[in-house]
Amino acid sequence: MKLTRKQVLSRAKASELESIRKLNCWGSRLTDISICHELPNIEVMTLSVNSIFTLEPLSHCQNLTELYLRKNNISNLCELYYLKQLPRLKILWLSENPCCGTDPHKYRMTVIRNLPNLQKLDNQVTEEEVAQSMTEGENITTTPSENLENTENGQLETTADQTSAEATSETDTDLLNFSMEETNKIREQLGMKPLPRDKFSSFSSPVEGNGSRKKRNNILNAVLLLLKDLDKEGLEIVQRTAGNRLHQLQKKELQQDR
């Protein structure tokens, strides 16, 4: 799905693209964000839970300071080449993309080396990581297409195009902070007040299973907290979407039982 000018103006409640500072397109099934070429003054952009595969359009957003890209289809860390051109970028959430690979440490070192001004990557950036990244991270100097050409010519590929894997080093606190911060970021962009940590924590189950179950529960917590502040129209949209998703899962289960 392509993000259109009309959608951007509607979501940002703006009359012109040049005036937009914040944009929330969380979970919108987007694959094409080329409209970002026309958002020179955007500062905060939430694009998590979509199907975006290239970051090239974002290279034109010179004022971008916060970028949320969790759970998309970014398969190659060479896409960082486009973010290196954003001097004000301080916060980046890129976890649960294929480019994260199976080595969380290598992934973090490469991102931090190429974006040394980051203050947060998925959760935080420490001074130790910044120092380590200079020797343990890959230095990205080419676009994804140039990297592909170099690989085909027998040169060493700088990053592995791998399927997404859960980072086993995530702690319970990391998962909670992740959901709480992203939830509050969405609430802020919807004009809602942020939730305090104690209120958010009260929704968490005291005894949980493996890492995937913890992550699922934290996502569920975030959704439930947002539902409380939605109006009738918003709730109807959520109801339709949830109904369609449930129908798809039930249909899949029936096919597997046959």
Image: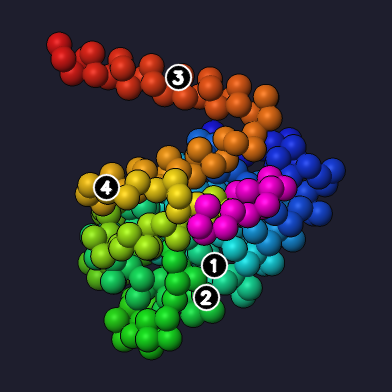
Mark 1 neighbour density, 10 Å: few (under 14) some (14–19) many (20 or more) = many
Q: Which label was assigned to residue 244?
A: 3
Query: Tag 4: Cα neighbours inside 10 Å, few (<14), some, or many (≥20)?
Result: few
Of the two numbered discs 2 and 3 on the same chain, state the one appearing first in sequence. 2
| Residue 214 position in % (x across, y down) | 31, 48
In primary-sequence order, the first of circles 1 and 4 is 1
Three-letter code for the amino acid on which mark 4 is drawn: Glu
3D distance between C-alphas at marks 2 and 4: 31 Å
Q: Is residue 88 left or right of residue 214?
A: right
Is 8 rendered above or below residue 232?
below
- Circle 1: residue type: Ile
The mark lying in front, picked from 1 and 4, is 4
Q: Position of residue 170 (x, y in %)?
A: 30, 62
Check residue 190 for magenta coloring: yes
Question: Which residue is identified by label 4?
Answer: 208
Tell me the kind of residue under disc 3: Asn
In the figure, residue 141 lies in which quadrant? Answer: bottom left
